[in-house]
Amino acid sequence: MTVKRSLSVRGHRTSITLEEAFWRRLNRLAVDEGVSAAELVARIDEARDPTVNLSSALRVHMLEEALARLEPERGPDPDS
């Protein structure tokens, strides 16, 4: 199920829709990095391609972060 939440990102109010599992992961990553979820979203927002919507950028960021944690175990990605 998707959940829509509102955040203030760099002083701008925005709504983001993500599946509950992604919200949990986003919050966990923020805690791990010692920042608020809004700050982590702001960092991802600043780095994203402006043609990609923010919810998609967040999902891709979390996927890439999870895959990067597996890299030492799996070896390099054959698609790279």
Image (cartoon, rainbow, N blue to C red):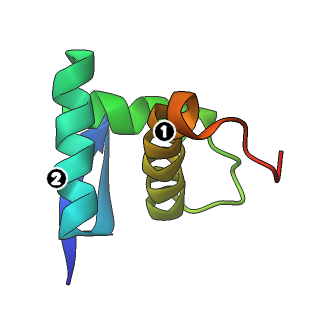
Instruction: Name the amino acid type tagged 1.
Output: Leu
Name the residue rendered at 23%, 30% in the picture: 30
Q: CA distance from mark 2 to mark 1?
A: 19 Å
Percent across and percent down for residue 53 are 56, 62
Label 2 Cα neighbours within 10 Å, binned few <14 / some 14-19 / many ≥20? few
Mark yes or no: residue 13 visible. yes
Percent across and percent down for residue 15 are 29, 62
Name the residue rendered at 63%, 43% in the picture: 48
Q: Residue furthest bottom?
A: 1
SS assignment at label 2: helix
- The answer to whether residue 24 is above or below residue 20 is above
Percent across and percent down for residue 68 are 53, 35
- The answer to whether residue 14 is above or below residue 73 is below
SS assignment at label 1: helix
- The answer to whether residue 11 is above or below residue 14 is above
Q: Which mark is residue 19?
A: none
Mark yes or no: residue 10 visible. no
